[in-house]
Structures are given as structure tokens and as C-alpha cells.
Amino acid sequence: MTENEGNDKKIEGSNPKKKLNVVTFTGAAGLLGLAVSLPGCDTICVNLSAKEILDLAEEIIHKSTRVHDTVALVSLDKLSYENVVLPLAELEARQLSLIQCCVFPKMLSPHDNVRKASAEAEQKIDAHMLSCRKREDVYRIIKIYAAKGESIAPEAKCYLQCLVRDFEDNGLNLTAIKREEVERLTNEIDELSLRYIQNLNEDGSCLFFTEDELSGLPLEFLQSLEKTQNKEFRLTLESRNVAAILELCKIAKTRKTVAMAYGKRCGDTNIPVLQRLVHSRHRLARVLGYAHFADYALDRRMSKTSMRVIRFLEDISSSLTDLAIREFSILKDLKRKEEGEIPFGVEDLLYYIKRVEELQFDLDFGDIRQYFPVSLVLSGIFKICQDLFGIKIEEVTEVDVWYHDVRAFAIFDSGSGKLLGYFYLDMFTREGKCNHSCVMALQNNALFSNGACQIPVALLIAQFAKDGSGEAVPLGFSEVVNLFHEFGHVVQHICNRASFARFSGLRVDPDFREIPSQLLENWQTDYNSGISRCYESFTLKLISGYRQDITKPLVDEVCKTLKRWRYSFSALKSLQEILYCLFDQIIYSDDDADLLQLIRSLHPKVMIGLPVVEGTNPASCFPRAVIGSEATCYSRLWSEVYAADIFASKFGDGHPNLYAGLQFRDKVLAPGGGKEPMELLTSFLGREPSTQAFIDSRTNYRRFEEVGLARHSLFSSRTACRETAVQQRRMVFVVEAKGKKGMAARQYQRTPPPMPKIEDDGNPRFVIFIRMANVYLWYPLSIIAGGTTAKIMVAAKDNLLGKYIYKDTIARNIAAVIYRDEKEIQKTAIKQHRVLRTATEFRYGYKLVENGNMRAALSTSDVIELPTQDQLKTVFDKVKDYFGDAKESFGKLSSLNPGTDEKTEETPDEKAK
């Protein structure tokens, strides 16, 4: 099939019974005769040789040059969307996958020559792409066409605006003199950024300590350090070494010495470099028409302006200050008890947070690791995402991969069966592989003018270990959390259905890109999210199982403790992050910011009185503000805050709500980067996003947790007083009052719903539950009364034979009653639980109302699932022979909410029935 042909082609996925119509194209890969890797993705070639990579890079450059030349030669009186914008959009879509086939081997290929060829190809392609964005002839055509104001689709208009910006970011809208200045400043910024990082990389600072001075460090750590002839340990100031000292070393003097040395790195060399770098970035922004660099960097992000970011950070900081003070008092009390009246410094934070957590939580992460086999965690994540987003994940076999343990999967829409995309998993470390985890877009979704559809393909790279026998080592808890996060990017990439490759996959607003992954992390430890509710986590049980017996998941107490551990000292940790985010934002929004004094001034204001470590200036060793996150360090916290709002607002019960999940998929993920993220979130939430849920998750947790802290003998009586106050305080819920914007919020105490009344006639009662077939989340539906036979069976349920009858035969009798009136029951269920209206198939369950305790019976735990109609077909006659007709054993179903049912007039036939 040629590049311009859009004929439908039937492909067969991993399930041989499932055939899907998928429109494909071959592109330049077909011109080179490259192999097909995945059905329907002819441009994804993962096993190219070094020569093939370099040849493909040349073909990419040649094709790109030809398209740009064609656009540049369009006559001014014949400019149209079809001959100006469309060729560039389709070129971009087709070439992305080909470029990735050239680039990703440098990170993953087991062959050294292939990795070198890939790096060389990337340099050539990057240089070509930059030259394309500097072509004045192409910019002139695009700019003239844009000025015509031709009516085109909103997403196409957004793409046109992006094309114009691509050129203008390189100064093509400026005079020749200013354009030269832009190029000079850009080169200067690149040179200064690299010098700053190089200075840090080449810093050889080290310290020497005796074994006593390193008390508290594990033996394995000490053995990893070089030992001098004086029997002292040589400690280099690498991040992992410094973190270990500040977190585990019992000697306060050692902690302070290390913190001071780490904060002084490159002070004499990097401070002048950073000052010049900040100055150059401000000058570049002004040449491009912005007041300062921060506004230039934020102009195309959700945050839009520096002032909005600063207000966001200050709002979070002020809201968490009271909690941070309480957390800090706990740390100071413990330090005073263990070290006396020595002042508490920043260097003590990590150590005493760790100490309190050891006292507060009985967690052995080495033991917990044994409960997270890779395969079980992966299948659990798949299950959650399938139930949440209405997708189906199937493994694809017999496809080309670049290493034997790489796996490929297809994602289908669970309702229609339509193929949505593919993803590869490269999960284990090996020689020649990169050393970080991430998700790469191998191919983006795109629609072409001839009707062809390009299928999205993602690649998840992880760094999990194998033991000496080649078996996967169980995951540490942090690795589990990271896998949840990264798989969120996979779902985001596949579910983005934007028509333009520029806006599909992960090519969305950077402030928005992390929100879906941050959202998915909530199901890791927040499956039951309310602080006042049970901490048992269905998710942790779903993804855990002891290595030697996977039927044994983590026990309830560990699940509860893990959630408490997640939020421990979250206010202090957040303030530390906000401190550096503010520093980054201020230096790039104020020309006159004093780098030496700024951090000294900010530190005690943000960190509740704690000064910066004596003699240090973190500005000399803060690479995030130099390259990669300059003026945007806030973005990770921004994503976390708004993900918390989404979770609390739409998934507050902690269960994967399919209706809300589909809404998120359709309203937030599917539009992609072609719409403003704030518009997408506002549409989904029904209001603008808020910071309140994030703040509540921290403050509510702490309010609950202080009870446990106060009981520990290490903590002062002041905390115990707070415990009493918390216990006595009435819980209130703040709800935004209806009416004009800005009206005060009102508070009310939520009253529990009334329990349905049942007659005490001696016969057993059962609560009937319903759920969607593909989502294991029960909803109470109605009550059914048992007759004499049911009463006998319930009475006999405690003996061995009775258990079988109670669990099996009663279930079949109840099922028989339900299926005779199933359509009416489903109508009633949808009226009571609107989330069920999206389902096409249901399952039913029941619970016995024991001792008249309706509240316990309405709990969705321990629901006994009823057999399906197919399972009943072979036993109806036996049930009738032994126990009579089901109608004689059970009465009619009574609604749990009779007052809410819509009354409809019965037909004569219904009355007769």
C-alpha cells in the first residue's frame, strides 16, 4: 500500500477471533521495504540495523525538504488550506513514527553500533527540523494564508497558529538585526546552561568520616564507600550519598557537615553563570515581545502568567502553614528528647521525618516488596484501567521486538471492540539500556484527508531487576507507584483522539500532561479515600500477592498503614517544594532579583522560620531552574493539585466509576492538545479546578493521624490536647452555596440516610445488589422476603450441609425470581443509580439481613454473587424438585427507595398478571 492510498485493510490482533477494520499507510518505511511490526502500524519498525537507521534518517530529511519546498512555491493567489496547512500537518503525522524508529534505539538497543547510529541520526534530524523552522519562504506563505482569515475547523485553526509560532519563536517576524540577536542570545543561553551543568558534573568535592561519625548507616552503604589508610570513609557528594546521610545518620554534626558541603557546591563558579543566564533569558523574552522570561515560558501553558503561578504557590503555602507548624513541632519534640536543646536545622528534617515514621508506622518495605510480583502488579493495573476507562487490554504475540523480554499489547474499546492503539513494555534493566523510566510516543493518532487513520503506539520503559536465574524481582512500593504513574501516560496517549498529530498522544500542554498520571496514582493508595472511612485498599489487595503464594495479598493493617505513610509530613514536604518553585518563578519574573539574598529571604518565610543551611546558596546547585524546567518548576505540583480535585470530585468513593471514567476519557483525554486544558477540566468538573481537595487531603489526614501521634510517649501533651479537641470537634462539610459567584460557603452536618423499614414477621430478608458486568462495584437495589423454605435454609446455614444449601440453593432461588422480571428490575436500578445507564450487561448479588441490621446488610462488602441465566438453565428443574417453585420461597422485590420510584399506570395485562 502506498503512502497516499487509504484503502481499508483488515488486520488480526492477538485474539484470532477478533478482526478489525483499520486504515493504515506505509509512508517512507514502505519505500525502504521495512518490516511490519504491529498489525495496522506499518511505519513502526523496531529492529533496524545501523545502516537502515541512517538511510531512513536521510529519507526523512529528503521528504521533509520536498514538502517544505512545495509549500514555499505555492502562488500567492492560490493559497488554500489544502496546499499550505494540510501538507505540513500530514508530513508531521507521518514522519513522527519514522523519526522515533530512528531515535529510540539509542536508549534501548542491545547493539552498540545501532545505538551510535541512532544518536547520529537524531542529531541530523534535529538540525534539519531547526532549519525548517527558520525558512523565511515557508513562513511568508503561512503568514499570508493565516492573514486571509479563511474559515477552517477549530483544531485546524489551532494548528495553523502553532505553525506561525514555530517560526516566530525563531525570530522570523522580527527585523534582521533583532533576528540575529535572537540567534545570538539562544546560543549564549545554551552555552551557559551546559556550563552550569558541567560544573556540577565535574565537582569532585568529598568528605571523610570515621565509622562512628556515620552511625546509623547500613553496612551495605558503608561497604560501597572507599576507605582510606586512616580507616576513614571517603564520601563523595553525589545525590544518593547525601540523601542517605541526611535520612539515616544519627550524628547531627555529620548531617550538618554534609548539608553545608552539598549546598556550597560550585558556589563561586555557578552563581555568576546563573546570573548571566537569567539576564540573557530576560533579554531574549523582551526581544520576542514579552515583559520577562517567565511570561514567555508560560504564555502557552495552562498557567498563562507568572502572577498566576505565584498566587497558586502562595495559596497552597498559606493553606498548609498551620499543618506544617504542627508537623514541625512533632519533629522538634523528638529531636529535643534525643539530642537535647540543640537548634533544629534544615539538615535535620529528613532524619527526623524518618525517625517519626519508624515510630509511627510498622512498615518493613523489604518484606512488603515480596507482595508485589511484576506480573501481578501489571495485571492489577490493567484491571483498574479497564474498569475505569472502558477499555480492554490484550497481549499481542508474534511481533518484532528489539529484545526477547519486550512485550506488546493492544487496547480496544470494551463497548464497541474498536482497536484504539498499541503499547510496548520494556520493563527490565540490561546492558546498553537507558537508566530512567518514561513513556515514549512511537506513533500519534492522526486523521488524513483521504480518510486514513493512524493508530497511536506508545512505549513504556521501566527499570525493574531480575535475579541471577533470570526471574523478575518483586517490585518495591515506590516502583509500584511509578508503574501506576507511567501507565497513566500510556492510557493518555492511546485515548487522545485529536485529529492532528501535533495535538495527539502526549503532545499536550506540559502543565496538563502529568494530570492523568497523577490521577491514576490515587488508586494506588486511595481506593477508599475518606479519612473517616476504613483504610482497607481494594487496589493494594488486587495488585499484591505473596511471592510464594499469590493468593495471599497484603493484610488490611499494612494497607491502612501504607496510606497513612503516603501523607505523613506532607505539609512540610510540600513547603520545601514550593520554596524552590517560588525561587525559580521569581528569578525569571524579576530582572532585579538578587540570587544571593533571595533564597535567604524566602527560606524562613516559606519554611516556617527555618533558615537556609549556614554558608550555602542552593542557587549554585539547582539544575531544574537552569535546563528543562526553567520558570516551570511549579508544573509537577500544579498537576498533583488538580488531579486531587478531579479524584475527589468525580471518584470520591475511591472505586473505578466507569461512568466518570468514560466522561474523563471523552471530555478530557480525547480532545488532546487542540483545546485549552482549563476548558477541558472545567467542562468535566462543571466548574473551574480548585486547590481545596489537595489541601483537604493533607489536613484531613493529619487531623486523623494526630490521635496516633499523641498516644506515643515521645510527643508532648500539647498534641494530646489537640487530639481531644479533634475528637470533640463536630465534622462539617463545606458546600458552595448556590447563587451568585462569591457568595459565602455554608456549612451543614451531613445526616445519615434513613434505613428502609421492614416488617418483623419472622421470615428472612435479603438485600439485592446489582453491578455492571465489567465493573466489580455493587449497588444496593431492593429487598426480597423469604418464605418458609428460605427460613429453614437460613436456620440450617451453620451446619456443614446447610452451608452448601444456604450459599448455593438460596442464590439460585433468588436468581430465578430476578430473571423473571429482569427488564423491570433494570429500569428500577437505572433510576436509583444513574451510573448504571451506560451498562449493557449486569450481574446480581445478595446479602442476608441478619438480626435486623439493615445498615450492615447495605454494605457492599461480602456480597454473594448470583449465578447468571446460563448457569441456571441446567438446575431449574432440580431446584423445583427439592424446594418447590422459587416464587413460593421468596416474595416480591421491594424497592429500597420506594418514595423515589416513578409511578406508572399498570396496563390491564399487567394487572391481570
Image: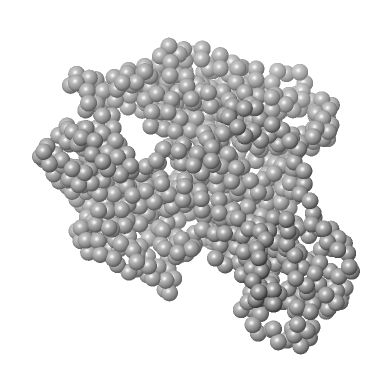
Total marks in image: 0
Q: Quadrant of the N terminus?
A: bottom left
Question: 663 or 404, which lies in front?
Answer: 663
Question: Who's the residue at 73% across and 18% down the image?
Answer: 342
Residue 349 makes an appearance in the image? no
The part of the image, by quadrant, that contains residue 554 is bottom right
Q: Quadrant of the C terminus?
A: bottom right
The part of the image, by quadrant, that contains residue 26 is bottom left
Residue 592 coordinates in the image, percent (x, y): 43, 11
Q: Is residue 89 above or below residue 757?
A: above
Question: 221 or 96, which lies in front?
Answer: 96
Residue 464 coordinates in the image, percent (x, y): 52, 52
Residue 119 coordinates in the image, percent (x, y): 30, 44
Residue 3 makes an appearance in the image? yes
Question: 882 or 197, which lies in front?
Answer: 882
Does residue 75 appear to the left or right of 569 in the view shown? left
Q: Is residue 802 above or below residue 606?
A: below
Question: 720 or 391, which lies in front?
Answer: 391
Question: Who's the residue at 32% across and 47% down the image?
Answer: 500
Q: How is the image coloured?
A: one colour
Question: Who's the residue at 72% across and 26% down the image?
Answer: 326
Does residue 518 appear to the left or right of 698 in the view shown? left
Question: Who's the residue at 41% across and 38% down the image?
Answer: 676
Residue 777 coordinates in the image, percent (x, y): 64, 59
